[in-house]
C-alpha cells in the first residue's frame, strides 16, 4: 500500500491568543516547517464574540498548511445553539459566527470548522484520512457544548453501562474500527492526559474512553484539561503480538478494558518552548492502525491559563489514493449535493 508521511500541527486552548515574534514564547513565529494539516481542538476564544472569532480565524488561516481543521470548545458559547437559547442570548450572534467560519474567506484560507461527526479528506499528495470530530465535554460549570456526565453520546446502546443513559445519535456516535483515522475532540477520554490538579485526579469522559477503544484510531488529539499537556501511546491489549505481551505484561495493566497505557516518553518542555513546538518522537504508522493509538493533549494554556505550552507536531503515515487536490467525495459517489467545502460529514451533514 502506497503511503504518504503527513505532518500535523496540533494545538488547543489558545483563548484569544495571537502568535508573537518574541522568541522567548512557546506560541510564536516561525511555526514548525513543512506542516500539511493544522488541527485546532477548541477554545479558540475566551468567550466567543464576532471580533474574537475573526481574530481566531485569521490566526488559523495565517498558518502555512494546506488544510486547517477546527472544532469549537466550551468557550465558543455563541456557536452552541442550545446554550444560546437556554441563556436567552441573541441567536443571530451564532448565525454571524457560523457565516464567518463557513464563509468564502475561511474556505480561501483552507479553514474548515467541523460539525460533530465523521469527515473525510484527501490532500494534494493523495494522502486520505477520516476525522471524527466533537466539541462536547462533560458538564462543569456553565458553558457551551456540554452534557451530563451520565449521558453517553458516543456509543451504541449495547456499549452503554447500566448507570448511564444513552443519548447518542447517528452523528454523535463514534464509528467502530477501522472507520476512524483521527479523533479530534475538545476534551480527553478518561484516565488519559486528563488530570486537572485541584479539581480531580481524572476529568476525562468515561464514555469517550469506551468510544476510542472501539474506534482504535491512529491519533486522538484534544485539549480542555490545561494541566495535562503532553502525549501518550496506548497499545490495544486485544491486538498485542507475542513479543509485545512479553514486553508489556498484561497483569501490569491496571485498567479493566483494552487499553495498555505505555510509560511516558521524555519530552523536554523547556526545549520545546525554545524551538516553538513539541514533537512525538516516533511517526504514527498506518501499518499500526488498530494496534496502538497516540494521544495528544495540545492545550497551549497551562493550569493558570498562561500560554506556556508548545503546539505539537505529529507525523502520520497515511494511505495514498489516486486523486490530487484536497477534496470531498463527489456527488456521483455519495449522492449528495456538491458543496464548496473541503470535505463532507460522512453522515450527510456539512
Image: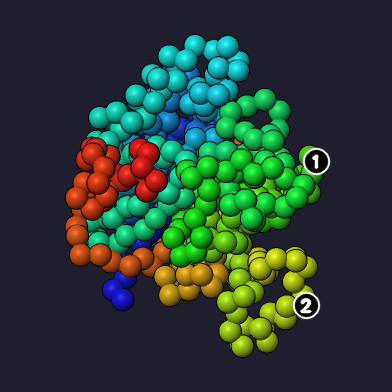
- Seen in the image, is 213 located left or right of residue 65? right
Name the colour scheme: rainbow
Q: Is residue 92 visible?
A: yes
In the rendering, at what x and y percent does residue 283 appear? 45, 69
- Res. 259 image quadrant: bottom right
SS at badge 1: loop
Q: Quadrant of the C terminus?
A: top left
- Seen in the image, is 268 located left or right of residue 338? right
Q: Quadrant of the N terminus?
A: bottom left
Q: From the viewer's perspective, is the residue at label 2 or at label 1 nearer?
A: 2
In the rendering, at what x and y percent does residue 247 appear? 67, 84
SS at badge 2: helix
The residue at the point 70 percent across, 66 percent down is 257
Which residue is label 2 attached to?
251
Residue reaching furthest to the front: 158
In the rendering, at what x and y percent does residue 37 appear? 36, 51
Which residue is label 1 attached to?
198
> Mark 1 or mark 2, which is nearer the start of the sequence?
1
Q: Nearer the viewer, residue 118 or 323?
A: 118
Q: Is residue 31 visible?
A: no
Local crowd at mark 2 within 10 Å, few (<14), some, or many (≥20)?
Answer: few
The residue at the point 54 percent across, 64 percent down is 216
Above or below for 330 versus 250: above
The residue at the point 50 percent across, 49 percent down is 184
The residue at the point 62 percent across, 27 percent down is 143
Above or below for 264 versus 271: below
Above or below for 281 versus 194: below
In the rendering, at what x and y percent does residue 153 appear? 60, 43
Q: Nearer the viewer, residue 192 or 15?
A: 192
Q: Nearer the viewer, residue 320 or 277?
A: 320
Local crowd at mark 1 within 10 Å, few (<14), some, or many (≥20)?
Answer: few
Amino acid at each position: 500500500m502506497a503511503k504518504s508521511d503527513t505532518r500535523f500541527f496540533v494545538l488547543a486552548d489558545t483563548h484569544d491568543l495571537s502568535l508573537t515574534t518574541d522568541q522567548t514564547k512557546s506560541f510564536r513565529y516561525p511555526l514548525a516547517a513543512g506542516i500539511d494539516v493544522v488541527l485546532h481542538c477548541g477554545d479558540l476564544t475566551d468567550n466567543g464574540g464576532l471580533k474574537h472569532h475573526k481574530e481566531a480565524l485569521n490566526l488559523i488561516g495565517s498558518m502555512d498548511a494546506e488544510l486547517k481543521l477546527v472544532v469549537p470548545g466550551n468557550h465558543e458559547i455563541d456557536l452552541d445553539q442550545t446554550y444560546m437559547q437556554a441563556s436567552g442570548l441573541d441567536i443571530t450572534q451564532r448565525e454571524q459566527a457560523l457565516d464567518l467560519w463557513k464563509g468564502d474567506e475561511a474556505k480561501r484560507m483552507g479553514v474548515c470548522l467541523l460539525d460533530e461527526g465523521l469527515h473525510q479528506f484527501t490532500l494534494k499528495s493523495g494522502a486520505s484520512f477520516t476525522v471524527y470530530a466533537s466539541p462536547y465535554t462533560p458538564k462543569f460549570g456553565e458553558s457551551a457544548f456540554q452534557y451530563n456526565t451520565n449521558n453517553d453520546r458516543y456509543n451504541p446502546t449495547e456499549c452503554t453501562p447500566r448507570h448511564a443513559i444513552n443519548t447518542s445519535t447517528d452523528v454523535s456516535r463514534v464509528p467502530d474500527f477501522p472507520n476512524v483515522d483521527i479523533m479530534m475532540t475538545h476534551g480527553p477520554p478518561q484516565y488519559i492526559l486528563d488530570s486537572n490538579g485541584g479539581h480531580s485526579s481524572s476529568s476525562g469522559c468515561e464514555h469517550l474512553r469506551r468510544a476510542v477503544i472501539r474506534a482504535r484510531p491512529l491519533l486522538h488529539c484534544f485539549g480542555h484539561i490545561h494541566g495535562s499537556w503532553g502525549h501518550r501511546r496506548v497499545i490495544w491489549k486485544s491486538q498485542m503480538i507475542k513479543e509485545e505481551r512479553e514486553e508489556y505484561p498484561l497483569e501490569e495493566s491496571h485498567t479493566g478494558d483494552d487499553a495498555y497505557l505505555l510509560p511516558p516518553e521524555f519530552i523536554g518542555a523547556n526545549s520545546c518552548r525554545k524551538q516553538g513546538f513539541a514533537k512525538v518522537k516516533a511517526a504514527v504508522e498506518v501499518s499500526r492502525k488498530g494496534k496502538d493509538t497516540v494521544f495528544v493533549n495540545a492545550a497551549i494554556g497551562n493550569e493558570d491559563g498562561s500560554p506556556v505550552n508548545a503546539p505539537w507536531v505529529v507525523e502520520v503515515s497515511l494511505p495514498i489514493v489516486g486523486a490530487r487536490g484536497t477534496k470531498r467525495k463527489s456527488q456521483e459517489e455519495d449522492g449528495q449535493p456538491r458543496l464548496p467545502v473541503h470535505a463532507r460529514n460522512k453522515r450527510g451533514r456539512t
